[in-house]
Image (cartoon, rainbow, N blue to C red):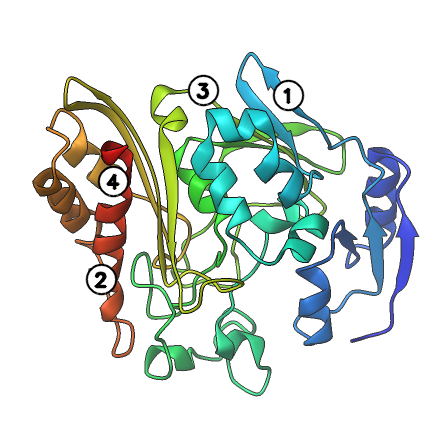
Amino acid sequence: MNDFSYVQAASTKDAARLRKDTPTAAYIAGGTTLLDLMKAHLQEHPQLIDINRLPFKGIEQTKDGLRIGALETMSDVGEHPLVVQQFPAVSQSLLLAASPQLRNMASIGGNILQRTRCGYFRDPAFPCNKRIPGSGCPALDGDNHNLAILGVSDSCIANSYPGDFSVALAAFDAVLTLENQKGRQRRVPLTDFYRLPGNTPHLETILEPGELIVAVTLPPAAHAQRSTYLKVRERSSYAYALASAAVGLDVQGGTIRTARVALGGVGAQPWRSREAERALVGQPATEATFRAAAATALQGAQPREHNRYKVELAQNTLVRALQQMTSS
């Protein structure tokens, strides 16, 4: 890890001033992702600006939906009664992630910004287009068993977001509030926040230099209240998803009125499948319907040698999650 200075920002204006003075500085909240990257020399910053004093906390009901401050911890959000009652899949996605110790430290904003766990990206001994544009992607023909099969390119097949929380956010139409260094805010749908790799895999989000995630807002919906998050992994705790599914259904008289589907562990970003949703709406809530929707969700998959199993695994994970919604 490189040497760096540390300073606490007293306000949003103070944070903006500090970042303007040192453009290559980094904001830090929980630090559970940033410090890992710095220890591995994947990111180097001359200064860390602690933003924990900024007014980005709170979980409250607003006219737009449930608003969650970006500095809330994963534990506090996952266990909050309003989240548990209105968005059970969101709560489950947080409580199934990491360890209790990390969940008690990690901020919501930092969780959204965590970076790929691709071994080639994490090891500076290897070339990596995400780390050094134009250097190559050894994962294409190397060890790619846990990498993406949807939204990939010839430049990168690493998952840009390896976690769980944003998968649930993608399913339920979450909107991010972002604030720039001039104090101006903009609202961006979570599904528009992440970039697909294309020819520029080093550009992972639309976040501008110095811009901060202020809050996440989840609009209320019947399918969100009846939702679940299912995660399949290599071991039962503290492991990233091989495949996951966040689903919500509003079923009336045995017919699906509305549906939301997002997949994790298989996409180059949290993968909202509107094709699967369209395949579900208006259909009977049966296994045949679920399997047809799952097949639709994976139609565009581009598996490599070691991750071909993910096509079937993701389909089965989605079917099982949908079955859980209709069996209770």
First in sequence: mark 3 vs mark 4: 3
Question: What amino acid is labelled 3 in the image?
Answer: Pro
First in sequence: mark 2 vs mark 1: 1
Pick out the residue farthest to the bottom: 125
Give the secondary structure at mark 3.
loop
Give the secondary structure at mark 4.
helix
In x, y percent, where is residue 157? Answer: 38, 68
Classify residue 280 as left or right of residue 263. Answer: left
In front of the other: label 2 or label 4?
4
Question: What amino acid is labelled 2 in the image?
Answer: Val
Residue that carries the numbered disc 2 in the rendered image: 311
Pick out the residue farthest to the top: 63
In x, y percent, where is residue 124? Answer: 60, 82
Question: What amino acid is labelled 1 in the image?
Answer: Glu
Disc 3 and disc 1 in contact, CB within 8 angstroms: no
The residue located at (43%, 45%) in the rendering is 167
In front of the other: label 4 or label 1?
4
Classify residue 147 as left or right of residue 80. Answer: left
- Mark 4, Cα crowd under 10 Å, few <14 / some 14-19 / many 20+, is many
First in sequence: mark 3 vs mark 1: 1
In x, y percent, where is residue 12? Answer: 82, 35
Question: Residue 253 falls in which quadrant of the image?
Answer: top left
Q: Is residue 128 visible?
A: no
Q: Quadrant of the N terminus?
A: bottom right
The residue located at (48%, 42%) in the rendering is 92
Residue that carries the numbered disc 3 in the rendered image: 220
Disc 2 and disc 3 in contact, CB within 8 angstroms: no
